[in-house]
Image (cartoon, helix red, strand yellow):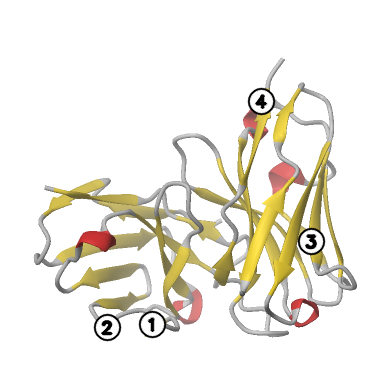
Amino acid sequence: QVQLVESGGGVVQPGRSLRLSCAASGFTFHRFDMHWVRQAPGKGLEWVAFMSFDGSNEKYADYVKGRFSISRDNSKNTLYLQMGSLTTEDTAVFYCARDRLAKRGNWHFDLWGRGTLVAVSS
Amino acid sequence: EIVLTQSPDTLSLSPGERATLSCRASQSVSSSYLAWYQHKSGQAPRLLIYDASSRATGIPDRFSGSGSGTDFTLTISSLEAEDFAVFYCQQYGSSPITFGQGTRLEIK
């Protein structure tokens, strides 16, 4: 079954760190660029980070630069998001998403997970 | 960055009716690189349309997209019960990619 399953969310205090994971199955993970997208409560979707299919290129939204780090382990079919210096404004459901075409840098997404909730609260 | 403004915020219609959702960009979207997604609460978002007018794999032909430049439209020709959800547009012609704030399509 072609799917993405996020995990690692939870309640975390401001200033602390958290690592999210996204397990891919049913497709050739190492051929696809991957992204993280988030949705704060009552808000719309917001792009967070990108990693190329081979891990050689990464990009971040300005509001997470220097705080978040995206990585992947193609041998484990897993994407990660290491989040640091968290603030209450980072409270959101975080989704991982797959580029529509392999190795093409499409920057639009044909496969998403159901998301994992990160709640930053003291 | 390109700001996408969707209208209306909420659209109340009945099954069988036609839905027209708008997405306006603050500047021209390069190469009509615009996508539409459907999102139901607790579920994964679903790609409907890419490149402004191409239907994604498996999407019924009652969904269609049109537009270019700064004005784009998603049309659902005859609403079915499972279509009611929140819809987002997204531009990927300029960095950073951005999403609209969403239109909620609810049953009247």
**Whether marks 1 and 2 lie on the same chain:** yes
- Residue occupying image coordinates x 68% and y 77%: A26
- Residue occupying image coordinates x 67% and y 58%: A5
Q: Quadrant of the N terminus of chain A?
A: bottom right
Depth-wise, is mark 3 or mark 4 nearer the camera? 3
- The amino acid sitting under disc 1 is Arg
Determine which residue is flagged by label 4. Answer: A88
Determine which residue is flagged by label 3. Answer: A79
Determine which residue is flagged by label 2. Answer: B61
**Whether marks 3 and 4 lie on the same chain:** yes
Front one among B95 and A19: A19
> Tag 4, which secondary structure?
helix
| Alpha carbons under labels 3 and 2: distance apart | 33 Å
Q: Is any part of residue A102 visible from this angle?
A: yes
Determine which residue is flagged by label 1. Answer: B55
- The amino acid sitting under disc 2 is Asp
Relative to A101, A41 lies left or right: left
Q: Label 4 marks which chain's residue?
A: A
- Residue occupying image coordinates x 31% and y 68%: B71
Q: Is any part of residue B28 visible from this angle?
A: no
| Alpha carbons under labels 2 and 4: distance apart | 42 Å
- The amino acid sitting under disc 3 is Leu
**Whether marks 3 and 2 lie on the same chain:** no
**Number of residues whose C-alpha sits closer than 10 Å to that of mark 4, classed few (under 14), some (14–19) or many (20 or more):** some
